[in-house]
């Protein structure tokens, strides 16, 4: 993330010399915020989840989808560190591989919705002809509760990782479009943009060099929240049975599988649920910190 | 005020039209033959033809859109592919649990969240404020279904205070009705309380810096009078707005909560329709929920001008 902030294009916009100071102070502010205990805990939890997901195969896990009829509903034991589910699948392994799925969905949806929202937002902000049409379509999409839109898209196209990603991404796009468009509209009247226009700079270059860099910081902040909300939406969709194919070990699928046996084996639902909640909590806490540091104006608004 | 109300009402028409067009376009623009999607995997050629004709899928797309919008205006949402029942009457028979749950949640949220926000705003940054803000972040982050299962685990399975799941209609007695509504309402309130408490806090903090608050204090008004009569009343507009906007997360929550607690409402109807791939029902419910959302926010916007005479458009 720091790499994006140090993007030379951002420095170029600041008055001469100020770029370096701002970069180091951003980093300092982020490091300083780790002094707060909740933020530090959130950071540790998130790093742990990422490490567990990345190194899942070498952390004592077994095949997360291996069925073992002899080991159904095993309690916590040497063989099953967190017990096993109705098919004798190892819960610990499924939790770790589930973290992979969540992170992939979160990153994928955040990247895709920001990429799509950026392009559409720039077009809407720069081309007055298309602005009204684009924004009305976005109003329409925003008025549909996102989970319902995603459910409908998945039920139409069938469950797979790609369709779930698309279904999670589409409802997130309008908010990115609105954000980007408002920044572009603001920046349009700035002196440096007018100067570039009067120097005869090609439109594409004005957009990429002078306007889009202004969206980087707010988009990083927005991306964090989309990351969290995408993980939540995937878990919700899978939990409802309208998400990833049931053989994929995602946290939502684990909870959906465990629902029937909840009264006897609450752990089947509670373990993935608690891990999911802790992950979301950490991302949201860190997102708030990132917003306060990177985008003070937005922090004030909310 | 009156021209504003008319303007605001008219402004919802393009939004609702766009919602209808988006819902219409989803089925038609999905890759593959819409009739085959609707019929399922093991439909015969004759069945496909039948669906194509009854749904008008053999017509040009603009004709289809026109017919679809016309039916919508007449309140016709089509019939279920599975049972053949009109979608409108299916909605009618499932609406009571959902409305009960939603109203109970809104009432609980206002009772809990507004005082939380006001208390936090009294001394920003102090222990009480930080506690409230921590609760608020937790409310945002812990998914409704996780809260639901934790509540069932602790209060139903361990302590036995509440039934695990289920719904009892109000006609069968108010006692069982309320008893079974308690846990779903608490679970669903989590995210909503977080949202409203946060906005109440920030808007009360903002108002506390105003001149009239200093005037009120200078004339010797008690702190509670200052907070409630002067600060909270003037902070009401953003709070009411967020209650309206929060209806979107309330709708998501209803779908999830009804599944967790086995309530036979509209949310579970959505899930049942998805599992059965009953597309007309899904479409109808999406439209219903979206229109409800738009109309609630319309009402909220109009209410401002009634409650806050300073707002003039």
Image (cartoon, rainbow, N blue to C red):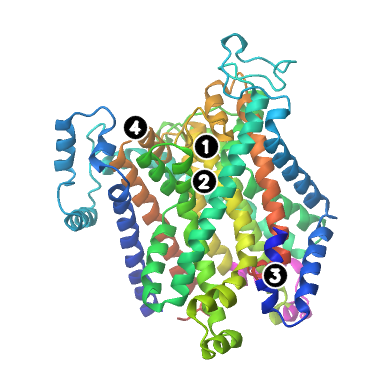
Residue B104 numbered tag: 2
Residue B82 in view (yes/no): yes
Marks 4/3: CA–CA distance: 47 Å
Name the spot of residue A165 as percent of width and height, x first.
49, 45
- Mark 2, secondary structure of its residue: helix
Q: Mark 1 = which residue? A: B181
On residue B98, the disc is none
Secondary structure found at label 1: helix
Residue beneath disc 4 = B276
* Residue holding disc 3: A296
Q: Do residues under tags 2 and 1 come within 8 Å of each other at their CB atoms?
A: yes
Same chain for marks 3 and 2? no
| Mark 2 nearby-residue class (10 Å; few <14, some 14–19, many ≥20) | some
Chain letter belonging to callout 2: B
Total number of numbered labels? 4
Quarter holding the C terminus of chain B is: bottom left
Q: Upstream in the sequence, badge 2 or badge 4?
A: 2
Please tell me which residue lies in front, A92 or A301: A92
Q: Check the residue under mark 4 and report the chain it is in.
A: B
Chain bearing mark 1 = B
Q: Above or below — where is A233 with respect to A9? A: above
Q: Do the numbered discs 3 and 2 sit on residues whose CB atoms are within 8 Å? A: no
Q: Are marks 1 and 3 in contact (CB under 8 Å)?
A: no
């Amino acid at each position: 993330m720091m790499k994006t902030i140090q993007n030379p294009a951002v420095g170029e916009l600041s008055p001469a010399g100020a770029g370096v100071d701002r970069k180091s102070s951003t980093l300092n502010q982020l490091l300083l915020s780790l002094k707060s205990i909740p933020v530090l805990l959130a950071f540790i939890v998130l790093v742990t989840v990422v490490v567990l997901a990345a190194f899942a195969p070498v952390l004592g896990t077994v095949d997360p989808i291996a069925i073992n009829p002899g080991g159904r509903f095993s309690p916590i034991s040497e063989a099953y560190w967190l017990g096993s589910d109705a098919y004798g699948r190892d819960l610990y392994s499924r939790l770790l591989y589930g973290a992979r799925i969540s992170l992939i969905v979160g990153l994928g949806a955040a990247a895709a919705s920001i990429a799509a929202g950026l392009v559409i937002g720039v077009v809407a902000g720069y081309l007055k002809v298309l602005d009204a049409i684009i924004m009305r379509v976005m109003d329409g999409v925003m008025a549909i509760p996102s989970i319902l839109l995603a459910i409908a898209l998945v039920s139409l196209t069938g469950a797979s990782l790609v369709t779930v990603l698309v279904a999670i991404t589409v409802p997130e796009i309008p908010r990115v479009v609105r954000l980007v468009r408002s920044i572009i509209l603001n920046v349009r009247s700035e002196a440096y943009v007018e100067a570039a226009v009067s120097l005869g700079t090609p439109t594409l270059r004005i957009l990429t060099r002078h306007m889009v860099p202004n969206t980087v910081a707010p988009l990083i902040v927005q991306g964090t929240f989309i990351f969290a909300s995408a993980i939540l939406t995937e878990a919700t969709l899978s939990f409802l049975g309208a998400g990833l194919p049931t053989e994929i070990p995602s946290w939502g699928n684990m909870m959906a599988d465990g629902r029937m046996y909840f009264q006897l084996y609450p752990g089947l639902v509670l373990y993935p649920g608690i891990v999911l909640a802790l992950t979301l909590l950490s991302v949201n806490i860190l997102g708030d910190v990132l917003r306060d540091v990177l985008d003070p104006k937005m922090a004030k608004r909310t | 005020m009156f021209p504003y109300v008319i303007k605001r009402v008219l402004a919802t028409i393009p939004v609702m039209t766009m919602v209808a067009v988006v819902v219409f376009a989803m089925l038609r623009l999905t890759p593959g033959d819409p009739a085959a999607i609707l019929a399922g995997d093991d439909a015969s050629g004759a069945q496909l033809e039948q669906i194509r004709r009854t749904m008008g899928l053999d017509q040009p797309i603009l004709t289809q859109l026109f017919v679809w919008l016309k039916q919508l205006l007449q309140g016709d949402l089509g019939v279920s592919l599975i049972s053949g029942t009109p979608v409108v009457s299916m909605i009618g028979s499932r609406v009571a649990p959902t409305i009960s749950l939603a109203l109970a949640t809104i009432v609980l949220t206002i009772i809990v969240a507004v005082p939380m926000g006001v208390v936090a705003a009294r001394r920003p940054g102090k222990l009480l404020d930080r506690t409230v803000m921590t609760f608020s972040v937790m409310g945002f982050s812990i998914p409704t279904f996780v809260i639901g299962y934790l509540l069932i685990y602790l209060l139903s399975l361990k302590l036995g205070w509440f039934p695990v799941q289920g719904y009892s209609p109000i006609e069968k007695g108010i006692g069982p009705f309320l008893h079974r509504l308690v846990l779903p309402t608490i679970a669903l309130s989590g995210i909503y309380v977080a949202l409203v408490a946060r906005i109440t806090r920030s808007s009360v903090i903002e108002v506390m810096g105003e001149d009239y608050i200093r005037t009120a204090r200078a004339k010797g008004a008690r702190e509670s009078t200052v907070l409630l009569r002067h600060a909270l009343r003037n902070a009401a507009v953003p709070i009411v707005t967020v209650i309206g906007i929060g209806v979107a997360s309330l709708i998501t929550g209803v779908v999830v909560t009804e599944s967790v607690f086995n309530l036979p409402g509209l949310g579970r109807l959505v899930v049942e329709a998805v599992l059965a791939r009953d597309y007309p029902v899904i479409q109808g419910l999406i439209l219903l929920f979206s229109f409800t959302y738009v109309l609630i926010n319309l009402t909220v916007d109009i209410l401002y001008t009634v409650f806050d005479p300073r707002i003039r458009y």
